[in-house]
Image (cartoon, helix red, strand yellow):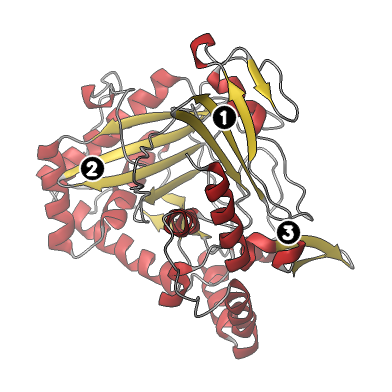
Amino acid sequence: LAIGLLEEAFRAVIARQSSLRTAFHLLDEQPVQRILDPADISFSIKRKEADEAAGHADTKGQEDGGPLGTLSGLIADFIRPFDLSRPPLMRVEVVRLGDLKHLWLFDIHHIVSDATGYAVLYRELFGLYRGEELPPLRIDYKDFSLWQNRLFETGTLDRQREYWLQLFSGEVPRLNLPTDYPRPKVSRFEGEMHMFRLSREDSVKFLEVGGAAGVTLFMNLLAAMNVLLFKYTGSRDIVIGSTHVGRPNADLRDIVGMFVNLLAMRNRLRPGTRYIDFLQEVKGSTLKAFENQDMQFEMLVEELNIKVDSTRNPLFDICINVQNYEQLRVELEDLTFSPAGYKYQNSKFDMLLWANQADEEIRFMLEYSTELFKIETIRQFAGHFLEVIGQVGRNKEIKLQDIDISLDVVNPETQAPDMDFDF
């Protein structure tokens, strides 16, 4: 690994992408962004040495070395808060494990990049490492900010605001999902991941139902999740969150920045409704939400004047996303990259479900709060979700009230903690 060349590639990307040169300050108690000149940005890759044979227990750093314990301990030592006034809001460290093996640690603040931005950053980084010349960017992140501000001037956001306020007029429903532990007064957002998959046979049938109904995989899974939560709680008025990429212009595909917006998807269920009819209702509500996606989630929360609860999201506790952003594929001569296997132990919501379609198989990653749920409960929840999907896949005419989940059965497809999924 040519660390010096990698460092120069990082500096070139920082100079190219203004979000990586952005500082955040308070001016008259209002947050403002200040974009620094590339010459004013100080960036370097921190280098450390590690004795791999000793299990990283005897690590010597050039700056603040010393014993860092296990691999997880080494990574945990690397992750720490950022000073938002001092860009770049990312840090990079390379630990030399041997002559031909390194551990590359990279951390970036979500305020300057979303998942699509990560893919852009890596693509440009490795292109520069290979000596390629990158084409000039047509627009900048600040152009997107200006475009958003113009939405206020044209009245577009006023119309979208009315849609959301009407959708959440009256009392906002809360999902009282049974938990293993009482909700803590102050959440530490501790969590774990659970991987599971839908069998190929059930995946094909479920996808066929969606195709015949003219809905996306996201809409189909959202409908199925509504059904499961209805079965668990008895609630017929359910709000589930989702993230939207928020890049309306094709030129934004090459920009590193934070574009994602949270959408609160509200649907009402009637037990006697056929699943295929409910699916069309979910399709309609989803399309309306997408049409009004420019209204930022935090603005909606302020408009609704919801009482802040530090232990949960203001509008929903369950979130679902279908992964469709670009995956990292690294091909460099004489270099091979593989994940280090770090165990992610946080949860932003009570549950956050990621779905991924690989060929004709649907795979899932469920991020869950360990402050609320035991793994046995999560495995059962995953099994029940697969049961719902399987039943509607086999019979799209089934009524919601007739969809059955066996409370004492855990689908064996969920018993796969070592799945190597591409999330």
Query: Which label sits on residue 362?
Result: 2
State the separation of the CA atoms marked 2 and 3: 43 Å
State the separation of the CA atoms marked 3 and 1: 23 Å
* Label 2 residue SS: strand
Query: Which label sits on residue 95?
Result: 1
**Amino acid tagged 1:** Val
**Amino acid tagged 3:** Ile
Report whether 326 appears left or right of 11: left
Q: Residue at x 47, y 59 (%)?
A: 128
**Image quadrant in which you'd find residue 340:** top left
Q: Earlier in the sequence, mark 3 or mark 1?
A: 3
* Label 3 residue SS: loop
Q: Earlier in the sequence, mark 2 or mark 3?
A: 3
**Amino acid tagged 2:** Ile
Q: In front here: 353 or 357?
A: 357
- Whether tag 2 and tag 3 are in contact, CB under 8 A, the answer is no
**Image quadrant in which you'd find residue 379:** top left
In this view, the residue farthest toward the top is: 54
